[in-house]
Image: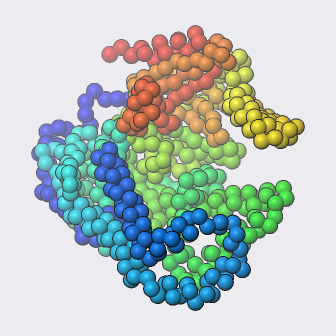
Amino acid sequence: MSAPGAGRFIDEQTADALDLPSQRLSKFSLFWYLKALPELTVGTILTIVPLAIGTIFSLILLIDWGVHRAFSQAQIEKAVNYDFDTIDDAKLQEWLDSPGLADWISGLSVWVFVIPILVVVGLALGWLIVRTLQWRRIRFGVQDGVIWMSGGLFTSWTRRLPIVHVQSVEFRSTLLQRLLTLRGVSISSAAPEGKNATIELLAVRRRAAAELANTMQTAFGAVIATPESGDSSSVPIASVGWKQLIIAAANTFEVRFSIISLYVFYKALGKVSQLKGWRDQAIHGVTGFAKSHHDLASIILIVVGALLFFWFFSIVIYIATFARFRLRRNGRLALIEHGLLTRRWRTVLLPHVQALSFIESPPQQLVDDGSLRMTLPGTGRRQIERTMLLPAVDRSVIIEVLNKLFAELNPETGNLLRAEAMQLERLPPSARRSYLLRWVWRLIPISLLLVAVLAGAGMGVYAALGLLPLVILGPIGAVLGNWRFKDAGWMLDERGRLMVRERSFGRTTRLTRKERLVWTRVSVLRLFSGKNVTFVASVAGIGSRPGLLGRLIGYGLIAKGDSRLRVRGLLHDDALVLVDRLAKRPDR
């Protein structure tokens, strides 16, 4: 979190003098390009949908032609009007053993089998050829201070990213890429549409990656994080050891990591025949146990086992993602390095950091741990490896890291977290009701709908079972709501630094400067909230193109989770005073 400067960090004249001739991706990059799905733009969708409809319609016509060629009209009508409920296992087995079936199959034309195979092979080859031709047309380079990338097969496209707008540079290398001396490169700009404002090179030769690194180092006037750069020109800020990382992985509970790792593990076991047999046997054993055991204790056992299973894999992938984590600073650049199988070297311009988030899961709160993440334009919560500034470590370490990292841009940033408990302004008692009833109000229509459905199905008095979600989950929601009410708070100090704390399940504390806010909003649900309102402010975080819903109901003000600072339950007058204080700019 830094104060916005008056000028650009990158000198425009220096950037305009940079030049890098047009180059192609490495030949080995075709493997990664074929694995990646094409970007789903409106043009792509308008192309794919008619092709898919045409393919399905052609297959229907082909099947219809094959059926009429193999059977007479009388046989087709008999099959259509046949009562399939009369078929049992004995009749089916008798039909399979009858010589008439073998005679009928031998009389079929070979094209009945060849044509479907040709269609599938043709579609696969067509996809392979189109993607290969698209890959061959990709070019990249630097000209007149602009990093550009072009390509396209049926329609030509060019993506241009001015170097003066660059906010982060990342080099990555998987285990296979390291064996082939390749590098992946990602250069992002300070724009809300992160993916559309990023130059993404899946795999280039090490020499081409080094040339890009030298170009960016010339523009920044400082050494950036690369596989070849040393530590002599940077100041070490923090590193995470194996013990800290394992503890952090165990209490972070990143569900997305567990799902990804489970899928990778499932596919990896399928590569070896013996392991594939063990995998399938284990899956059948679990599903068989679930089918034969329906008592409450068995259901609880299955749920607990599944949670432990996902938890274990989240630990594995978390460790693999953030192993050997190092954070260094070189002037106004943060140099981040981490990864076990896929190694990443990322450089972030600290003046572009919009906000900081200190995230604590319930187990982390018990030991005063948490992870530190940053909000950059164009990055969201799903890009955790790009927003992570420090994996889960002790709060005192994070305070020290922030004080060192932003010593020049915003001194004593970390001290805000040290004084958080004493200086936060709490919500008024009248806000407790909205927190207690927040989930209860959502359960009421669900329960009433279930009651109506059960009553309509003739369940009689048992229709009251539809109220179970409200009866069981309502008290749980009220307890969680009271927990959230006690944790919520905010603070705006004399230096214009805003801190907001809220909880969903884990607790999140966000820090930013009021100069970073792009808009504020005060909203109220008059039916239930009374005099209490919700205050929302947003920095320049992740954005997106307006979708169908936005076109129908209007665009409005949309803030993604990582860019939003929200306080629920403020009194209306207090919210307006806070908005006025945030609108005032310091005298220059």
From this viewpoint, which residue is outermost toward the top? 573
Residue 108 image position (x, y, % from top left): 43, 82
From this viewpoint, which residue is outermost toward the front? 74
The answer to which of 128 and 399 lies nearer the viewer is: 128
Where, quadrant-wise, is the C terminus in this rendering?
Answer: top left
The answer to which of 157 and 407 lies nearer the viewer is: 157
Q: Is any part of residue 171 visible from this angle?
A: no
Q: Residue at x 55, y 46 (%)?
A: 371
Q: Residue at x 61, y 83 (%)?
A: 96
From this view, report whether residue 578 is shown above or below residue 193: above
Residue 222 image position (x, y, % from top left): 26, 48
Residue 305 image position (x, y, % from top left): 73, 61
From this view, report whether residue 489 is shown above or below residue 121: above
Residue 464 image position (x, y, % from top left): 84, 36
Q: Is any part of residue 142 visible from this angle?
A: yes
Q: Quadrant of residue 258?
A: bottom right
Q: How many marks?
A: 0
The answer to which of 81 and 92 lies nearer the viewer is: 81
Q: Would you say 511 lies left or right of 458 here? A: left
Q: Residue at x 45, y 33 (%)?
A: 549
Q: Quadrant of residue 418?
A: top right
Q: How is the image coloured?
A: rainbow
Where, quadrant-wise, is the N terminus in this rendering?
Answer: top left
Q: Would you say 258 lies left or right of 167 here? A: right
The answer to which of 569 and 442 lies nearer the viewer is: 442
Q: Residue at x 86, y 38 (%)?
A: 460
Q: Would you say 318 lies left or right of 181 here? A: right
Q: Would you say 211 lies left or right of 168 here? A: left
